Structures are given as C-alpha cells and as structure tokens.
Amino acid sequence: MRITHASNRKKDREWTHELAEKYISKLTEFLYDRGFLEEPEQVWNLDESAFNTAEIFDRVVGRKGMRQIYSQFDGTEKELVTILPCGNAAGLQLPFMALFSGKLHVRSRLDGTGGHCYQGVNATGTKDQLHFANYLKMVVFPAMTKTKNVIFVDGHFSHVNNFTLMKYITEFEAETGKIVYVFALPAGQTGHLQPFDTSVFGQVKRAWGEYLRCRHNMPGGLVRKVVSVLGDER
C-alpha cells in the first residue's frame, strides 16, 4: 500500500532543475569545500510541528441524562503544543522541545519522558525566537563534539532572523573554539529536503490524525445520520 503525501503544485513547479543545481552548488561552496560535511556527527537537523489539542475535548464525564455537557479549558479554542525534535546524521537523537501554551511550567507534563523532553511555555504554544535560541543553547550546542558543525533548518522567521541565536552562536564559538553554521533550506521545499519533515513528522502527523478520527467513532453506537454521495442528509 502506498501512502499519498500532500504537495503544493506551485511550490513543486518552483523547484526546477536549475534551482536544484544552485542549491547543490551552495552546499558544495559553503559546506563541503570548508569541511562541514566530512563526518555525520557534524550534520544536524531540526524541525517543528504544532498540534492542536483543542480537538480532543470531545469526551467528558457528566451526570447521566444531561442533554448538554460543557467541557471547559483555559485559553482560546486553538490550544497548540509545538514539538521540535533535533538530531544528527550519525543517529543521535537529542531531547525534543515541547512548547505549551500558558504561563506556568506544569511538572506532570514531564511524567514518563525519562528526561528526554525540554519543556517551554509561552502565550500561544507556537515557537518563537527566544525559545528556539534557548533550546539550541541548552540542548544542541552541548551535544556537538566536532569542531565544524552545520544545522539545517527551514526558512522560518525564528530560524533565520534570530539575533539572540546569533549572539549565542558567537559566545559558543568563542568559549569552545567550535564553529556552527545555520543553513536554511530553499523556501517551500522542506517537504522534499528536510529529513525530520519527510520522515519523523510524516509518521507522527498521520498517527495524530488517525487518533483524532478514532476518538469521534463510537463502536456499537447507533447511526443517526446518513449522508449520500451527493451530500443530502437522510
């Protein structure tokens, strides 16, 4: 069985043979020729994905016979949790970052993680420049063992235009003598080129979507509405 993968036609048309050659030439000029691609431990990749947890508030406990049961939760209807994994080409997987929406760190969120989770909190649950920079400083930089290192990222604003991250990189290089490059992938092509986007989150997102669909199924329940092929309710 083959699983389809959604791809933007416009972005696919933009990824021409000429652009691919240009991308490869930049890899050669800035990384390969300068010794950043000699060993797998030098090559790092990370990617994030936001999951909307508001969709799982479809089952609650209430008094029998009540026709309407309210399920209340703090915040807006769009409750996001952003997950950001990071690893290198040698197979080393670092503790991932889980960024929750809210104001306080909740200790119970770390239960069962075995110390493999870096927790963050902000107002929206969406990754920002500060949390991204702090994650690299606290988790990624200490794991680097080679003198020359490159981190492949997508062209997200918090990755490219991040002055806090540039400050942390400068300090890290001055303290350790190691060199860190941040290499942005071509815009709109992370679905083809970024390992974590094409492998890790491809499986996670499909599993998450299937989980949400299963929560809305009631095995053994009565079918109360039938929709025909034309969309008319019966």
Image (cartoon, rainbow, N blue to C red):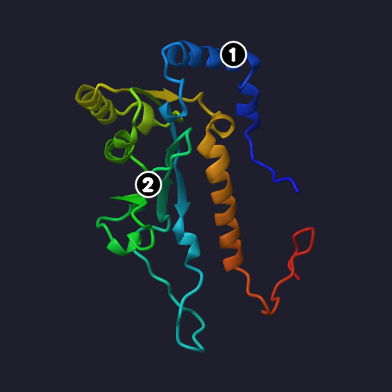
Q: Position of residue 124 (x, y in %)?
A: 34, 49
Could you tell me the amino acid type at mark 1?
Glu
Which residue is under mark 1? 21
All told, the count of numbered labels is 2
Q: Nearer the viewer, mark 1 or mark 2?
A: 2
Q: Which residue, as the protein is rendered here, is positioned at the far bottom?
A: 65
Which of the 4 image quarters holds residue 112? Answer: bottom left
Report the residue at 49% width, 89% height from top.
64
- The amino acid on which the numbered mark 2 sits, given as a three-letter code, is Pro
Q: Nearer the viewer, residue 78 or 155?
A: 155
The residue at the point 45 percent across, 83 percent down is: 62
- First reached walking from the N terminus: tag 1 or tag 2: 1
Disc 1 is placed on an element classified as helix
Task: Give neighbour class at mark 2: few <14, some 14-19, many 20+ (Cα, 10 Å).
Answer: many
Residue shown at the point (53%, 35%) measured from the top left? 195
Q: Nearer the viewer, residue 157 or 142?
A: 142
